[in-house]
């Protein structure tokens, strides 16, 4: 996880978009001056890749906790839980170069709350308590709103409504996965897993694009 963080502070580079050479050839054949080739910052692509990796690790280790607890494997559950916490610290650490340590610490607290609500929902599901499930689900959604509000307050290019939608959908994926694994619905859970992984990319890309918009000098 630590190896991903230096990517966020790498020097800015540019890379040509596919198709630029074809466009230039077309204009030359027509006797026209070719336009400047379109470029994309390699730094932005690297940042998206780094954040995608961090968010994928989040769902990977949470799933490991769910499977281990449902199987009654305390050793595996404890090890996976430690990785969930370490990953939350890494995600929070990724914003530190942009917003400082205080913001990083606050984001970690919010991510810890996200994990805590998931853990409570898992325990409630194992216990068969619908009331506790409902309470944990309410806490999970409230936390998603808190994270969205915090991030939107830091970056005007992260609209709070968009972030709230992305994060509540993510929370719902966790709940659905826990229910399916608990019920032994493994085919359904495989589809949920694929949707979760794809959704992590959406969240990561939205965050990276917001950073590039707010700090263009870091992404040239």
Image (spheres, rainbow, N blue to C red):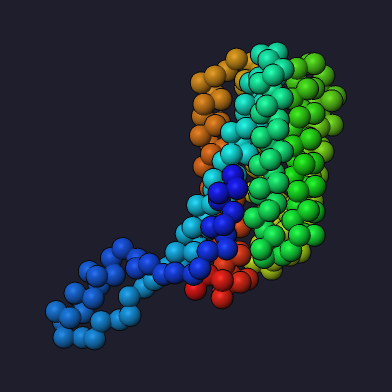
Residue 154: % across, % down: 73, 65
- The residue depicted at 25 percent of the width and 82 percent of the height is 34
Quadrant in the rendering for residue 193? top right
Residue 120: % across, % down: 80, 28
- The residue depicted at 19 percent of the width and 74 percent of the height is 25
Q: Is 9 situated above or below 70?
A: below
Taking depth in this image into account, of 178 and 65 the one nearest to the observer is: 65
> Can you say which quadrant of the picture contains the N terminus?
top right
Residue found at the far left of this picture: 29
Count of labels shown?
0
Taking depth in this image into account, of 202 and 130 the one nearest to the observer is: 202
Taking depth in this image into account, of 99 and 156 the one nearest to the observer is: 99
Quadrant in the rendering for residue 143? top right
Residue 153: % across, % down: 76, 64
- The residue depicted at 66 percent of the width and 49 percent of the height is 91
Residue 202 in view here: no
Q: Is 144 situated above or below 138?
A: below
Residue 217 in view here: yes
Quadrant in the rendering for residue 129? top right
Q: Is 160 situated above or below 23?
A: above
């Amino acid at each position: 996880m630590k190896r991903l963080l230096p990517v966020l502070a790498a020097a800015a580079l540019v890379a040509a978009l596919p198709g630029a050479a074809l466009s230039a050839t077309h204009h030359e054949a027509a006797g026209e001056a070719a336009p400047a080739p379109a470029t994309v910052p390699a730094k932005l692509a690297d940042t998206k890749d780094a954040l995608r990796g961090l968010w994928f690790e989040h769902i990977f280790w949470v799933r490991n906790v769910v499977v281990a607890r449902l199987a009654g494997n305390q050793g595996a559950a404890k090890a996976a839980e430690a990785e969930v916490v370490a990953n939350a610290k890494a995600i929070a650490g990724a914003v530190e170069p942009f917003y400082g340590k205080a913001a990083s610490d606050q984001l970690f607290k919010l991510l810890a709350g996200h994990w805590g609500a998931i853990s409570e929902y898992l325990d409630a599901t194992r216990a068969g308590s619908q009331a506790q499930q409902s309470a944990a689900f309410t806490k999970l959604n409230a936390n998603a709103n808190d994270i969205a509000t915090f991030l939107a307050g830091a970056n005007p290019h992260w609209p709070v409504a968009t972030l709230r939608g992305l994060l509540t959908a993510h929370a719902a994926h966790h709940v659905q996965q826990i229910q399916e694994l608990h019920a032994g619905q493994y085919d359904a859970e495989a589809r949920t897993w694929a949707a979760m992984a794809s959704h992590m990319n959406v969240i990561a890309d939205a965050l990276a694009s917001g950073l590039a918009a707010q700090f263009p000098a870091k992404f040239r």
